Amino acid sequence: MYNKQSLPILQKALDKLAQGFSNLPSFEQEVPDEVEEILMQVAEKMQDNFPYHHPLYAGQMLKPPHEIARLAYMLSMWINPNNHALDGGRASSKMEKEAVAEIALMFGWKEHLGHLTSSGTFANLEALWVAGNIHPKKKIVASELAHYTHERISHVLGIKFQKIACNKSGEMDLKKLEAQLKKGSIGTVVVTMGTTGIGSVDPLPEILELQKKYHFRIHLDAAYGGYFRLNDNLLEATAKKYALMQQADSIVIDPHKHGLQPYGCGCILFKNPEVGRYYKHDSPYTYFSSAELHLGEISLECSRAGAAAVGLWATQKLFPLLRGGSFSKRINSSHNAAIQLYKKIIADKQFIALQQPEIDIVIWARKEKSISEINKTSKDIFEKAASKNLHLALLNYPVRLLPNHWRAIKKDEEYVTCLRSCLMKAEHEDWVDEIWKIVVDCLE
């Protein structure tokens, strides 16, 4: 199930790490006798989980970290660095700056201000906090399918927030957006590069044109879909959106999603390094060990896991963020898997898909005469699939946004419950046939 052959590599790395502190007097902590017994209890309790690591888990956005990230993270735990000030994480702070610069370059930014965060939510909070400082009396808007945290964050920050309706492609409706922009009350537009519900990508090229006319900030929430910038087999319209990401003012991406990292690794990037002035603060004791920039000076969070930076740095050394590289091919595989599953759905007259996937999220349902019947059938397939070790997810989607090929279905409820698959793992490309076989078996 797990690759335990890498553990000797960790032991070698620990021995190498210890050499750096060989000048210190000998000191070792004893391992209490109870540790093994307690760890066995932990292992048993952790069995009460869905098999997130396996390709038959194709439901929520859960993806195991790569072996290199896991090993590097564990190795750093023997130091337990804190990437707030250089006092607590000299090496890991340098690794964070290098890794974040590589992500910024993936988006076309040689100059930037950025750092890692504990999550995409906190990264978005920092982006909207800066936006609120730049336009203190103006609103933040995002599409109705954008992540719910934007509205919550805005309320926390005391900034007015408004949802913009979507069209039947699941994208922000440009006419509805411009109608609000004409009022002059919008300071920032959040553009979602891969909604977490259906994987739709907002129309960035057209929003950039509106920016020239109405002069607002553009923040890209690319927490889920950002790495698809490296994908070379997207739909032409989607590829055009990703090709213009460098024109945004700020970007959030989550390495703990498609970036192969353990949880606790988000990233915020600003195109203009001068926004660092909003972070400026004094500290009575933390920033004196070096004249170099301490990451705590450009972050709202104080203590942050240096281990997250170590894991990310090591992963990006193994998988450089280059189009056509080995990491890019993994992203391609996720998209290929989604397209393969979509083709099976539309080829089988028993099912109906929401739309062709823009990234790696597929939404579909069994075709019925009414929405209420679809809702019942989706839940039934979801439960039967789980009993066969295939784990999908369910999505409640507004009926008014359903595309035209759903028009023959009776609209007797406001929301339709669909089956949803996030085919995040590169291995999913080789498992689509098995996944589909189980889905079809659930109809018997």
Image (cartoon, grey):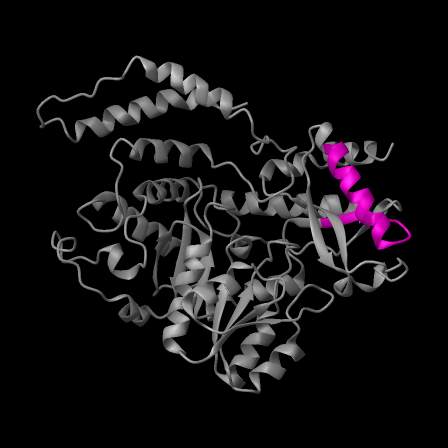
Where residue 46 sits: x, y (%)?
50, 26
Picture residue at 47% right of the left edge, 35% below the top:
66
Q: Relative to 249, is 394 on the left or the right?
A: right
Q: Residue furthest top?
A: 33
Q: Nearer the viewer, residue 440 or 304?
A: 304
Q: Relative to 290, is 254 on the left or the right?
A: right
Residue 147: name its quadrant.
bottom right
Where residue 65 sits: x, y (%)?
47, 37
Residue 229: say if magenta: no
Q: Nearer the viewer, residue 286 or 347?
A: 286
Count the labels in the image. 0
Residue 388: name its quadrant.
top right
Q: Is residue 432 visible?
A: yes
- The residue range painted magenta reads 363-385
Picture residue at 41% right of the left edge, 65% below the top:
127
Residue 393, above or below 234: above
Residue 44, above or below 165: above
Picture residue at 74% right of the left edge, 35% below the top:
383
Residue 355: name its quadrant.
bottom right
Quadrant in the picture for the C terminus? top right
Residue 379, above or below 300: above
Q: Is residue 433 visible?
A: no
Quadrant in the picture for the N terminus? top right
Q: Relative to 148, is 127 on the left or the right?
A: left
Q: Relative to 381, is 143 on the left or the right?
A: left
Q: Main secondary structure of the magenta part?
A: helix
Where residue 402 sits: x, y (%)?
78, 61
Q: Nearer the viewer, residue 16 or 257?
A: 257
Where residue 201 sits: x, y (%)?
61, 62
